[in-house]
Structure formats: structure tokens, C-alpha cells
Amino acid sequence: MKHIKIVAKNRIKRDKLTGCGECAAACQSACKTSCTVGNVECERITHSLERKTKEG
Amino acid sequence: MIHTFTCLNRHFCVDTFTGSVFELNELSKLMIEAYKNSSFIDINREEFFSYSKKELDEALIEVESLIREGILFSKEPFIKTPEFNGDIKSMCLHISHACNLSCGYCFAEGGDYGTAKKSENTSLLHMSISTAKKAIDFLVKFSGKIKNLEVDFFGGEPLLNLDVVKEAVSYARGLEKTNNKNFRFTFTTNALALDEKAIEFLNAEMEHVILSIDGRKDVHNSIRKTKAGSDSYDLVLKNSKKFALARGQKSYFVRGTFTVDNLDFTNDVLALKTEGFDRISLEPVVLDEAHSLAIKKEHLPQIFDEYERLAGEYLAHRAKGDWFTFFHFNLNLYDGPCEQRLLRACGAGCSYVAIAPNGDMYPCHQFVGLDGFKIGNVDIGSYSRTIPIRFGDKNHILEKPLCKSCWARYYCGGGCVAASIKYNNKIAVPHELSCEMQKKRIECALAIWAIENQ
């Protein structure tokens, strides 16, 4: 498209793996005072990717 | 819900309900803002006069195709209220309420969270190994099916009770196999007593380490004094550099605080970068408005400009291969958590608890010592779910009117509940000043993502 560039599409995941409780649950890995979920990774996706990488 | 904004001289748009993000030119920005205001784009309006018919037609087709695709002006879907099942994933162990620094902005009131003033707690500055083990047992017992458990050693200054940390880690590791758990440890330290043996231990056992240092030497020394009142920067810097060098690729952050006295905090981030740190976090101070170092509403315009200046410097450094990361500019636009997780950023009280040296349990580290927020005590084995249920019911964005109408809700997840209580005395009313800063950081982070991934 000429006038609009898609930077990210459908970030919100509504249809799978909901609420397993494995993702980071607090601000303790870096800031300790301001909470965010914008940079949290889905534990299952990350681990599945790591596994695939290890398996080659 | 749509949010358009300009950052680093470029225009962007966020579709809240899908999380889709777009970069716009001047014309598409005008069209999207027109549609946002009236659900209709009238190309005969004055603001479109300078564009040719061809340009207008092209842009209109692009806007309409994205709307048809359902990623622009998407409708609010049905959103399931996040469940609270009582499983606990994270624990902050206040391993020592003693501290070898006396920082001017300390939210822990010198390390002990004001507990020394209360007669029942006066004798306990260091957590005993018995209490630490009971806390870990509690976490394992109440973690349900959650496999990856997080434990942060915090203070005060946890290096002042390192032997107990070592024993607690060893104890927790011993529970992993039989209970099908995996512990991830974090250690937060002011680095003043960080010697080589401690570095070796932290690098072997800690998934994350946070070193507190405020940036420029004069900024740091003006606030982070030793108990004797002398400067701490030189020793903290020396120890932190030694640590970062030994750390290799494992995760760490140098984490500073900015106050009203250093609203030019880009210079502090860059000072830390110049000293060789490549993982940096800098947080706005948490203080009552009456405090001389507090950040107030009138400082926001300057802070917004400063975040944008930092974003520009960040991009410039990284573009020339001088890589570093700033915690709040990290975004995960593709591998982030599910919507249920995005609805509740902070698990305080629900899936996260803090344990004071005497075994008292609170919803998070910022609640320790706060009257009315004690959940139980691991030493005597008491635990009430009254407070956790209250936090579980109220601490998510569907219960927070301000969040329900906020475009940034899926990035911040409702913010810090301790700040909500501290400033508004209500779980469901976020601290607006923090929200405004958070939103600006998100805008910068989205702009950075767009520019670096173009």
C-alpha cells in the first residue's frame, strides 16, 4: 500500500492457549515499579521455538 | 478503538482490539482521524483540498480495505473476564530489610518498609533460612499446575544475607524434580557489596539480575548515599561493570530511577551506555506528591519530550551497530501472551506475593508493611484468600473504567496495582500520572519497532 504501511497485524491472541498462567506475572524481572505486558513473551510460544531451534 | 499519534516526526495508528499497528502518511492520517470522528470520510472537506483526486481515491481504498479486513476500526469483541484460580507463580523474598545505602527516594523507607517502627517486627531484619524454606514450600504447594516459578531475592539489600539466598536456592533446586517445577531466580541489588564470589554465584544461579545505578555520577551520588552519608557511585559502578563483564549473554539490567531533579534522563541512560552497559532500565520515581523529588503533572510535557529524545538516541545508536536495549522500549508484537494474560499485567495478590523477613505475606513488594494488606504468614502457616480474591476480582482492565476506554490497555495491562492503592486507594483506579508516562513510552516503542522493522 502507498499511504498506509502495516507495522503489526492482529497482535491480540484470542483463539488459542489462553490463561495457562506460565507467563511472567509481576514486574520483578527488571523494573519493580511499573508494570507492563507489552514486552512479555508467551511462555509456550517461546519454549516451543527454543525446542524447535535445539532440534534443528 | 483507534489511537493516532505522531512520534519521531512520523505518524502511526493503533487499532486497540486487534493490536494492529499502522504507519500513516499525512493524507491517510487525516482520513483515519476524520473517520474516527464521524465514521465517514468526506473528501470535500477543507483539509483534503491540497490532494489530487488520484491520491484521495488511493488512500480511501486503502483505509476501506483495512476496515473490511477487520484490522482497522475493529469492533470490540466479547472478552471473557480473566479467571482467578488462586495459583501462585511468583514470589518476592525480602531476604534482608537491612540496607547499606540510604537513598533519598527509597520506597522501602530505608530498607525495612517502615516495619521497624512497628513493635511486632522490630527484631527481624534478615530472613532466616527456615522462613525462606517455608516460603518456597508455600510457593510449590500453591502453584498448582504452573511449572515455571519465579523467585526474586529483594530487600533492603539481599547481598547482606547472601548465605540464606544460597541455601534457599539450593533448597528450591532440590524440590524441582520431585514436584515437576522449574525455578527462575532474580536478584535485585545495589551492587555496593558485590564481590567476585557473589558475582560467581549470581551468574550461576540467577536468570535475571538487576543492578541499581542511576546514570550520571552526580545524579547517582546526590541521592544514593551510603549510611554514613558518603558517595556510592564509584564503587557501585566498578562492581557493576565487573558483573556485566562476567555475565556474558545472560539477562541483567542496570536499573535507575529518575526524579524531578533529572528530567533530562536521556543523559543518564546514555551515561550508562557509555560505561558499557547494554541492558538499561530507568524508572520514574514513586513518591508522594509532597516529596521534593516527586514527579508531578506539570512535569509531563518535559518527560514526554525526553522520552522522544531518548527514542531518537536509541535508534541512532542501534542503527550504527552500537546496540543496547531500554526496558520500556522493548515490545513484543508477535509472540506476546494471550488476551487473558494481557487483561491483567500485574499478578499482585493473585499470582504474585511478597514475603517479609518475619514470614508475613503481602500482595507484592510495595505492599510490605502496609496495614490491611497482610495475607498470611509462612512461618506460622496462615494464609487467607480474602485479599487475593479481592485483587483477582478487581485487578484487571475490564474492572477499571479508565482502562476500558484506553487505547494502551493491551500494552500495559492495567498498570501497577500498588500505585493504584498508593495514590487512589482503590485497586481499580490506576495512577493517571503513571498511565500518561506509560502511554508515551508505548508510543515511542511502537515508533521504534516500525522504524527498525521497515
Image: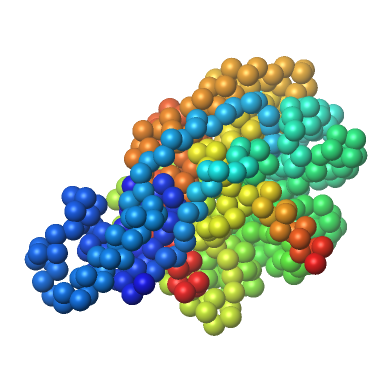
Q: Residue B405, position in %: x, y? A: 34, 40
Given residues B337 and B173, the one toward you in this image is: B337
Residue B266 visible in the snapshot: no
Measured as percent of width and height from the top left, residue B287 is found at 45, 42
Q: Residue at x 62, y 52 (%)?
A: A41
Residue for point 68% across, 32% down: B88
Front in this rendered view, residue B20 or B217: B20
Question: Could you tell me residue A3's position as x and y percent?
Answer: 31, 71
Task: Identify the image's colour scheme: rainbow, by chain, secondary structure or one colour.
Answer: rainbow
Report x, y in % for residue B86: 65, 26
Q: Is residue B252 above or below residue A23?
A: below
Name the residue: 66% across, 65% down.
B237
Position of residue B234 in the picture relative to residue B32 (left or right): right
Q: Is residue B84 visible?
A: yes
Q: Which residue is rendered at x = 42% and y = 65% of the image?
A: A6
- Give the left or right position of residue B262, taking residue B392 as reference: left
Is B233 drawn above or below residue B185 in the view shown? below
**Residue B302 or B101: which is nearer the viewer?**
B302
For this orientation, the residue located farthest to the bottom is B320
Residue toward you, B451 or B290: B451
Residue A22 vertical placement versus B84 (above, below) = below
Quadrant of residue B140 in the image?
Answer: top right
